[in-house]
Image (tube, rainbow, N blue to C red):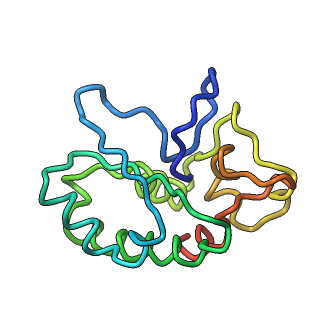
Amino acid sequence: MTGCQADYGDDRHCGNCQSLASDIPVREVIIHRQECERPERVYHQLSAQGAAAIKFIPHLQPSDARLWGDFLCAVFAIWIKEDANRIVVPLFEATLRAWRGETVRYENNPPGPACAGCAWLRLCGGGCPQLRLEDGSNALCEGYRQFL
């Protein structure tokens, strides 16, 4: 359930990359360290600009995982309170579906071996293949666990 913009040539993707209705313009937002440090400003600016759908795409180092988690938690708190019925955020909607027991992981995106036995696997589905490290773990796993 990460920000995945990779084109794999097939339908491997994460919860953040699920298809949206074609009539909804999606704003793909690259999140760097500096955006993680001001999540409220980032989100409110997108909302004020009339964003109908937002995909957050992390461009962070594994050492920034905690910042990513802080960013997601802060933005989710705003979104759920102010805009859940107005702005589509696929990552957040996939997370809510997972908490309701619905399937998040896609068959063509199996989790890496490092995810086997993880208590969070049913919620994250193994994350985005683009962010996997050599051992198959997700580079931002700590941040996602914080958010989940």
Q: Position of residue 109 (x, y in %)?
A: 70, 37
> Does residue 74 appear to the left or right of 107 in the view shown?
left
> Does residue 115 appear to the left or right of 49 in the view shown?
right
Relative to the observer, which residue lies in front, 29 or 17? 29
Query: Is 101 drawn above or below residue 73 in the view shown?
Result: above
Please report the residue visible at 37 percent of the width from the left and 51 percent of the height from the top. Answer: 29
Which corner quadrant of the image does residue 73 belong to? bottom left
Q: Position of residue 49 (x, y in %)?
A: 13, 54
Relative to the observer, which residue lies in front, 145 or 29? 29
Please report the residue visible at 79 percent of the width from the left and 65 percent of the height from the top. Answer: 118
Q: Position of residue 11 (x, y in %)?
A: 60, 26
Please report the residue visible at 48 percent of the width from the left and 47 percent of the height from the top. Answer: 16
> Does residue 113 appear to the left or right of 53 in the view shown?
right
Which corner quadrant of the image does residue 75 belong to? bottom left
Relative to the observer, which residue lies in front, 92 or 133? 133
Viewport quadrant of the C terminus = bottom right
Query: Is 117 drawn above or below residue 73 in the view shown?
Result: above
Q: Position of residue 18 (x, y in %)?
A: 47, 37
Please report the residue visible at 34 percent of the width from the left and 77 percent of the height from the top. Answer: 38
Which residue extends farthest top? 9
